[in-house]
Image (cartoon, rainbow, N blue to C red):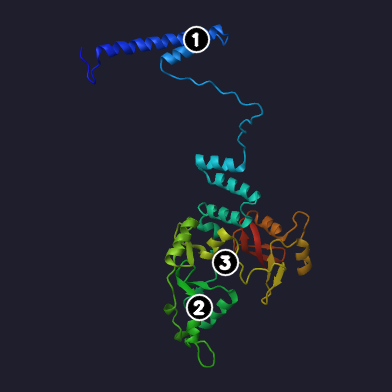
Amino acid sequence: MATKGNPTIPGERDDAAAATATATADAGATGAAGAAAGTGPGVGAEAGAAAGAGKARKRPVAPKPGGRSPAPARNSWRSRLTRTLAGGIREPAQLLELLREAATRGLIDADALAMVEGSLSMGALQARDLMVPRSEMVCIRREDPLASILSAVVQSGHSRFPVLDGDRDDVVGILLAKDLLRAVQAGRGLQPGGDARRLAFDMREYLRPAVFVPESKRLNVLLKEFRGNRNHMAIVVDEYGGVAGLITIEDVIEQVIGEIDDEYDVEDDQDIRDEPNGRSLVRGATTIADFNAHFGTQLADDEFDTIAGLVMQQFGRVPRRGESVTLDEFAFQVLRMDRRRIETLRVTRA
């Protein structure tokens, strides 16, 4: 049968077959010689067979005397990080574990670790976790005269106020303190003698629209909305549409970067600061002994060392910012929370 391809001359085909047979015989002879020389039975035969098949087999090379063996892989933090990243991080807890170990090794500082932890926790927290409760909201009524409004602004020290028309569930807008300054500068609502004149001041000219969010709003989504619509305050409503509290952009940012000090924070070198209105700002880490010495009380310190621990026991749980509790003859209002620790209290004699 004829085959495709280049034709082969009968004489050349016979010569090639003869050459192959000769090479195979030589390889077999070499194997036999190897066996006779004591190199091991079958070694030469195997070499001959390999040569006859046209394949070359390499012998393993023994390590040289004094040579170094490959060092085993070190179970270091870097190798574990590489393996974890290569396998994929599936849970935030895995990432936090690596970052905490990096912090212990000095690769990142404690502040950076706290910010990462706060950022990762935002997806799990809701507006109800950080909001100022409804009972602690400082509000202004739409029919209030300008003098009363200015007094509330100065006393509270806040910059934004919900404006009510009726009860606390009827929020009609937000009033900014800087807008009141424009009204005062323009002479609105004030007579030359300084007396407030209610009819000359129209609240509707200075109201800004209120933003309402549900209690279940996630903090990461809320922060994105704050940045998008350029609002700094939102009214939190419950499932029935009633006002549950309020939350500001500062509350959300503090969850990431920590507390932002303002005029209501106690100085680092001062645990108790008295205010002109008879109230006091007390650091949560203040010892009960120092509290008793300052206020002339006799609160027990056999179970807790700090005033924050005593107040926490009175609540029976982790309180929210703005909540109050009465202990002995004092009312304690939580002003600042550092995650699950009371940072600052406002103390008033009941």
* Crowding at mark 2 (Cα within 10 Å: few <14, some 14-19, many 20+): few
Residue 49 seen by the camera:
yes
Instruction: Give the residue furthest to the left.
Output: 2
Going 50% across and 91% down the picture, which residue do you hit? Answer: 191
Q: Callout 1: helix, strand or loop?
A: helix
Which of the two discs, 1 and 2, sits closer to the camera?
A: 1
Q: Earlier in the sequence, mark 1 or mark 2?
A: 1
Q: Which residue is mark 2?
A: 178
Residue with the mark numbered 1: 31
Residue 232 position within the rendered picture, expressed as x and y whole percent measured from the top left: 49, 67
Looking at the image, which is closer to me, 19 or 127? 19
- Mark 1 belongs to which amino acid? Gly
Secondary structure, mark 3, is helix
Q: Amino acid at mark 2?
A: Lys
Quarter of the figure with the C terminus: bottom right
Upstream in the sequence, badge 1 or badge 3? 1
Contact between marks 1 and 3 (CB within 8 A): the answer is no
